[in-house]
Amino acid sequence: NQNESKIEMVSKVIKLYPNPNKGTFTISLNKSISEIDVTVFDAVGKLIYQTNKSGKDLELSIPNLPSGLYIVKVNSNELTETLKFLKQ
C-alpha cells in the first residue's frame, strides 16, 4: 500500500517524544537543519507557541499548557511536517 510506505518514510524523518508528555518534548530529525520554524496549535487551531530553531534534536518546553491534544507544525526549506502530541 502506497500510504503505508509514505507513513513509514515520514516516521523515519521526524519523531516527537515523549508522547504523551508534560509540556517538555524533543523533535528529532534525521539530519541537522538550520532555520526551522516550529509552531504549536491547540486542538481548535489556536496558535499557542512559535519558535525558530536549528539542529537535529529540537528540545521544546512550553510551561503551563493545559492538558489536551496539540498539533505541532515543523517547517523549513527541506521539510514540512505536522505532528501531534498529548499533554498530560
Image: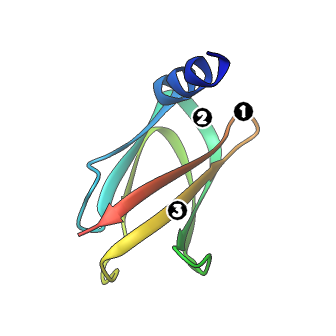
Residue placed under numbered mark 2 in the picture: 33
Is residue 43 left or right of 18 when viewed as pictured? right
Closer mark to the observer between disc 1 and disc 3 = 3
Q: Position of residue 83 (x, y in %)?
A: 51, 50
Please name the amino acid that badge 3 sits on.
Ile
Alpha carbon of mark 1 to alpha carbon of mark 3: how far?
20 Å
Mark 1 vs 3, N-terminal side: 3
In this rendered view, identify the residue nearer to me: 4 or 41.
Answer: 4
Please name the amino acid that badge 2 sits on.
Ile
Please name the amino acid that badge 1 sits on.
Glu
Query: Mark 2, residues whose alpha carbon is within 10 Å: few (<14), some, or many (≥20)?
Result: some
Dot 2 lies on which element? strand
Q: Position of residue 30 (x, y in %)?
A: 49, 24
Mark 3 vs 2, N-terminal side: 2
Dot 3 lies on which element? strand
Question: Looking at the rendering, which quadrant does residue 81 occupy?
Answer: top right
In this rendered view, identify the residue nearer to me: 15 or 61.
Answer: 15
* Residue 39 to residue 56: above or below: below
Alpha carbon of mark 1 to alpha carbon of mark 2: how far?
8 Å
Q: Position of residue 42 (x, y in %)?
A: 51, 75
In this rendered view, identify the residue nearer to me: 30 or 67.
Answer: 67
* Residue 46 to residue 79: above or below: below
Q: Are marks 3 and 2 in contact (CB under 8 Å)?
A: no
Alpha carbon of mark 3 to alpha carbon of mark 2: how far?
21 Å
Residue placed under numbered mark 3 in the picture: 71
Q: Are marks 1 and 2 in contact (CB under 8 Å)?
A: yes
Residue shown at 26%/57% (left/top)?
20
Residue shown at 60%/34% (left/top)?
33
* Residue 14 to residue 68: above or below: above
Residue placed under numbered mark 1 in the picture: 78
Closer mark to the observer between disc 1 and disc 2 = 1
